[in-house]
Amino acid sequence: MSGHSKWSTIKRKKEKTDNQRAKVFTKIGREIAVIVREGGPDPASNSKLKDVIAKAKANNVPNDNIERIIKKAAGETGGADYEEIVYEGYGPSGVAVIVETLTDNRNRTAGDMRHYFDKYGGNMGQSGCVSFMFSKQGVIVVEQEGVDEDKLMEDALEAGATDFLTDDGVFEIRTEPLDCGAVREDLEAKGYTFISAEVEYVPSTYTTLTDPDDIKNMAKMLEMFEDNDDVQAVWHNWENADDAE
């Protein structure tokens, strides 16, 4: 089946230092808290919570931490009021960038995002300026080792997947955004385990950088976004992300 895999980006995200891993825990904790306040603490009746718990486990967040965050969020009547804001813009040489944030201070976050775009040779644009180059898709990643490709493809398509890709030691299963959780659960019930399973912005076209300064600036820009506590996820159409590591 056809398509372009984002495994290189996912792999880069998985190779974190302890300090970066702590940031990942914090960001997922914030996401869990917001979802619990919106839809309640029971994953059986809150499908978003069920999905983010799966995401937390894929990122090795301990079960005790997950339960503690859910209990705390369920019992809170005050606390920070976070809102989800998506920023769009361009990196060096027109690389399209989408940044998802959860913030309790939109002025602070907007200022930070604009600064990162400007500092590293890009510019922040209006809502919609690059999102038309992406489609939202469920992306479920399974390690190839010990997995029968034909059987997984059959099971995935039977569960409702729309596409099946192979790349760099992994299988990547694509779904409609709303079907991602159901397909993941179906495959989980059949004994498969996942590196990641979440809705992503998948680019329709990619931009390759060749200038060393552009590559350096793009890598630094992504690093600044990912290190910011308000940023939940960064999506882009830079083809050769791993080359900048």
Image (spheres, helix red, strand yellow):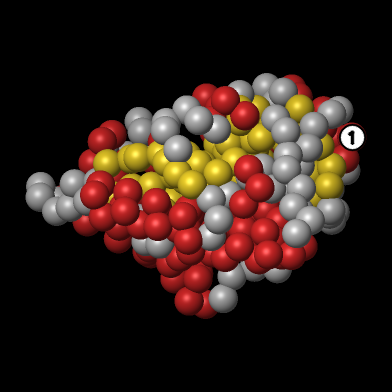
Q: Left or right: where does residue 139 sit relative to residue 233?
A: right
Q: Is residue 240 above or below residue 156?
A: below
Q: Quadrant of the C terminus?
A: bottom right
Could you tell me residue 95's position as x and y percent? 63, 45
Residue plotted at (68% across, 64% down): 213
- Residue 29 in sight in this render: no
Q: Secondary structure at mark 1?
A: helix
Q: Left or right: where does residue 19 sit relative to residue 188?
A: left
Identify the residue under disc 1.
Answer: 150
- How many numbered marks appear? 1
- Residue 118 in sight in this render: yes
Quick one: 109 or 136, which is closer to the camera?
109
Q: Is residue 213 above or below residue 124?
A: below
Residue plotted at (50% across, 71% down): 20
Could you tell me residue 159's position as x and y percent? 68, 25
Q: Amino acid at mark 1?
A: Asp
Q: Quadrant of the N terminus?
A: top right
Residue plotted at (52% across, 77% down): 18
Q: Quadrant of residue 108?
A: bottom left
Q: Is residue 85 above or below residue 57?
A: above
Quick one: 169 or 108, which is closer to the camera?
108
Extreme residue in the left direction: 78
Residue plotted at (62% across, 52% down): 92
Q: Is residue 102 above or below residue 177?
A: below
Could you tell me residue 215's position as x and y percent? 69, 61
